[in-house]
Image: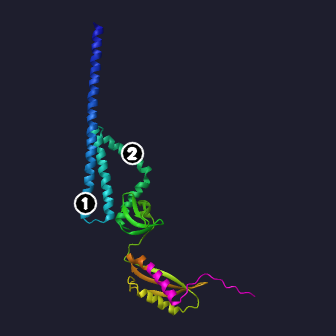
Amino acid sequence: MILILLQADTLLKQEKVLQTLLEQGVYFGLSILKALVIFLVGRLIIRLLNKLVKRILEKQKIEPSVRTFLESLTNVVLIVMLIMMIIGTIGLPTTSFAALIASVGVALGMALSGNLSNFAGGIIILIFRPFKVGDIITTQNITGTVHEIAIFYTILKTPDNLRVYIPNGSLSSGVITNFNVGKRRIEWIFSVDYGVDYEKVKIVIESVLAKEAFILSTPAPFIELHALENSSVNVVVRVWVKTPNYWTVYFNINKTIYETFNAEGINFPFPQLTVHQK
């Protein structure tokens, strides 16, 4: 009789354990299902909110460089909020998770100090604005158009259509040449043979410059004898143009000077050596 009672008590305990496991399994399964639904819905909401933020920033006519930075920052914040919601739905305590995140953040902050400096560099770029989206800049021996200023990187689009990602930390603390100015000066040094009439060369160059519509009259073009080299007489020419016309004028004048000098009998020199035999 006692044995039967013990067996019945054991079976009852086993049933309770199985029932508890079943209830916890169902609860955990439902939590996972809820978390999956929140993840899918959250991704959709994040996408819609990102589009909404982008539309609002565009309507406010905020500068593209600031706009892209704020869009990236908004996306990161929304993703972190979604992760916190999913963790809370599964049943993990968000407070302890936040403490864990804080401690991990300290460790990551030490390990990823470079990325933190890149983030700070992005803030510095947006505050002091050494350049903006659309500007042509040269930095770290790379020249290109600023395509995007993100949280950690600035993306340059080079003339040969490459995209170069430059960390904001090194960019904000390095040397930057910004070509987005109202006007720029172009300089040529044309070499002619010794014996050529300098005044004739100057008149020919002035006539060529006068036909180029993109050259500005103020400041006036500058033409002077630059140097007497071993095999040539060098003439320096400087003009001012609006920045978008820089390369057009540069190549046009090169072509026209070559054609005009040949037509006027003004010879271009080549390296030569005079040998005297005794």
Q: Is residue 203 above or below residue 58?
A: below
Few, some or many residues within 10 Å of mark 1 (<14, 14–19, 20+): few
Q: Could you tell me the amino acid type at mark 2?
A: Val
* Quadrant hosting residue 40: top left
The residue at 26%/31% (across/down) is: 26
Q: Which residues are magenta?
A: 250-278
Residue 199 vs residue 91, the one in the foreground: 199
Q: Residue at x 30, y 55 (%)?
A: 74
Find residue 174 and report its horizontal and vertical position in percent.
45, 65
Q: Nearer the viewer, residue 28 or 41?
A: 41
Q: Quadrant of the C terminus?
A: bottom right
* Residue ID for mark 1: 55
Residue 138 is situated, as x and y percent measured from the top left of the image, at: 44, 68
The N terminus sits in image quarter: top left
- Would you say the residues marked 1 and 2 are in contact, meaning their CB atoms lie under 8 Å apart? no
User: In the rendered structure, does residue 259 fall within the stretch colored magenta?
Assistant: yes
For the view shown, which residue lies furthest in the top direction?
A: 1
The quarter of the picture where residue 170 lies is bottom left
**Residue depicted at 47% across the width and 91% down the height:** 203
Label 1 secondary element: helix
Residue 98 is left or right of residue 200, and the answer is left
Q: Is residue 277 above or below residue 173?
A: below
Residue carrying label 2: 104
Amino acid type shown at disc 1:
Arg
**Residue 249 higher or lower than 164, as above or below:** below
- Quote the CA–CA distance across marks 1 and 2: 35 Å
